[in-house]
Image (cartoon, rainbow, N blue to C red):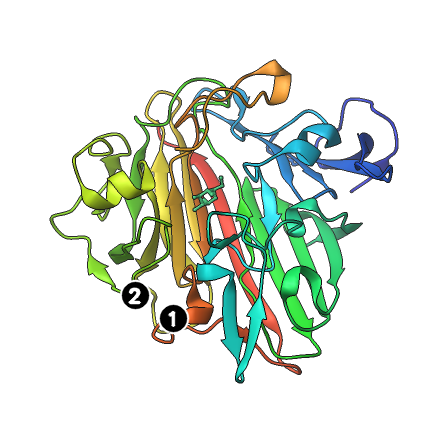
């Protein structure tokens, strides 16, 4: 049975605990919800930025480690520039020249990344205080986060009602279901920005993780990391992860695209099956711990980012500083800059339609 305790006591297996996580910069109280499942895994989520704060998963010997980068309190998230664990919106990744045209009207956004808009603008969903509600789930425990993004917020049209449901299942999966509706035609691309290190946060770089991505193509970028529009074959490039390959095996090769990204920071075009529903997009194995993570999604793309902008100056949980490439992100998404790229899958959301995407991170071990 799920219980909601207001205390800071040690959580029971299969329980939900709510605790204070500090305050937003304008003084509103922030909470942390801690879910413990029947297999001993634990997920902590805050309503500030909807961020996934920690994820504790067993290794092949049953030893649990926190595999996510993050901060110890709301102040950390208030100052965050890396989007640790955050819910990203309205538009995950970049929109070129900070503008797009819908029905002949030009919408101008904030330039918060060179000449471009990144992750929703100056105050994206990662800085919003979401309304939280715990829910029972058939296969675990859920937290629903809701947010109303008003018409014109960060330059985007339409009053947008967003709901994100996180579920920690009893079989060590973390499912994220995103839904949204709008009252005006708009564009939308929601994602979760978890920084993972399957050996445990603060345990060094992620270059030894073996990665498989179900993608035959990726979207090359220009110097501002905006896709050029080309879908390039991964064959004979360092972007071929169709067979398990160490993240670090080719990351420093003199490849033009790797140089532009400072490593991997690219959208992969997933090999989507014709039928609807979630499909396997990527798999990771961390050989020393045996931890395995699979990413399942309904989305057509995934941004593979190797923490190239981490510089060891950001201090996170437990006072640990996070150096370059000490985590990887696999952000399920529609392709970057889609509002300006007519050949990319559409990100337009119409009034009366329902945005609905699902991504699940499934954890297991390899002996
Ligand atoms: C995404 C981007 C990166 C970087 C991070 C946040 O992954 O593609 O370039 O901006 O977010 O630091």
Q: Nearer the viewer, residue 346 or 230?
A: 230
Residue hosting label 2: 229
Q: Nearer the viewer, residue 215 or 274?
A: 215
Sort mark 1 into few (<14), some (14-19) or many (20+) by Cα contacts within 10 Å. some
Which of marks 1 and 2 precedes in the sequence? 2
Sort mark 2 into few (<14), some (14-19) or many (20+) by Cα contacts within 10 Å. some
Give above or below for 55 relative to 103: above
Residue 173 placement (x, y as % from top left): 54, 44
Residue 254 placement (x, y as % from top left): 16, 36
Residue hosting label 1: 341
Residue 155 placement (x, y as % from top left): 64, 64
Pointers 2 and 1 in contact (C-beta within 8 Å): yes
Identify the residue at horizontal 60%, vertical 30% (top origin). Answer: 70
Identify the residue at horizontal 46%, vertical 55% (top origin). Answer: 94
Image quadrant where one finds the C terminus = top left
Identify the residue at horizontal 35%, vertical 20% (top origin). Answer: 288
Report whether 129 appears left or right of 55.
Answer: right
Q: Is mark 2 on a helix, strand or loop?
A: loop
Q: In which quarter of the image is residue 364?
A: top left
Q: Quadrant of residue 190?
A: bottom right
Q: Nearer the viewer, residue 22 or 172?
A: 22
Give above or below for 187 relative to 235: below
Give above or below for 74 relative to 349: above
- From mark 2 to mark 1, how far is it between C-alphas? 7 Å
């Amino acid at each position: 049975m799920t219980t909601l305790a207001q205390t800071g006591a040690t959580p029971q297996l299969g329980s939900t605990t709510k605790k204070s996580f500090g305050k937003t910069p304008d003084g509103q109280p922030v909470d942390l919800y801690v879910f413990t499942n029947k297999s001993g895994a634990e997920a902590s989520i805050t309503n500030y930025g909807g961020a996934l704060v920690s994820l504790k998963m067993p290794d092949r010997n049953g030893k649990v480690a926190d595999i996510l980068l993050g901060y110890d309190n709301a102040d950390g998230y208030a100052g965050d520039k890396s989007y640790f664990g955050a819910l990203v919106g309205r538009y995950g990744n970049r929109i070129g020249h900070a503008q797009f045209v819908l029905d002949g009207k030009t919408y101008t956004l904030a330039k918060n990344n060179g000449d471009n808009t990144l992750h929703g603008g100056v105050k994206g969903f990662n800085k919003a205080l979401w309304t939280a509600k715990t829910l029972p789930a058939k296969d675990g425990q859920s937290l629903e986060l809701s947010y109303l993004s008003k018409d014109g917020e960060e330059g985007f049209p339409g009053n947008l009602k967003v709901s994100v449901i996180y579920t920690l299942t009893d079989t060590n999966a973390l499912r994220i279901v995103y839904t949204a509706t709008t009252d005006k035609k708009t564009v939308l691309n929601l994602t979760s920005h978890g920084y993972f290190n399957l050996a445990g946060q603060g345990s060094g770089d992620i270059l030894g993780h073996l990665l498989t991505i179900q993608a035959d193509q990726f979207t090359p970028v220009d110097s501002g990391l905006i896709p050029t529009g080309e879908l390039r074959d991964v064959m004979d490039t360092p972007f071929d992860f169709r067979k398990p390959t160490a993240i670090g095996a080719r990351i420093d090769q003199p490849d033009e695209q790797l140089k532009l990204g400072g490593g991997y920071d690219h959208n992969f075009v997933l090999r989507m099956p014709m039928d609807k529903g979630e499909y396997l997009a990527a798999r990771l194995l961390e050989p020393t711990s045996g931890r395995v993570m699979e990413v399942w999604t309904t989305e057509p793309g995934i941004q593979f980012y190797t923490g190239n902008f981490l510089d060891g100056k950001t201090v996170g949980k437990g006072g640990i500083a996070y150096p370059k490439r000490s985590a990887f992100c696999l952000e399920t998404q529609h392709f970057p800059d889609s509002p300006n790229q007519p050949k990319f899958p559409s990100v337009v959301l119409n009034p009366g339609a329902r945005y609905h995407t699902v991504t699940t991170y499934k954890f297991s071990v390899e002996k």
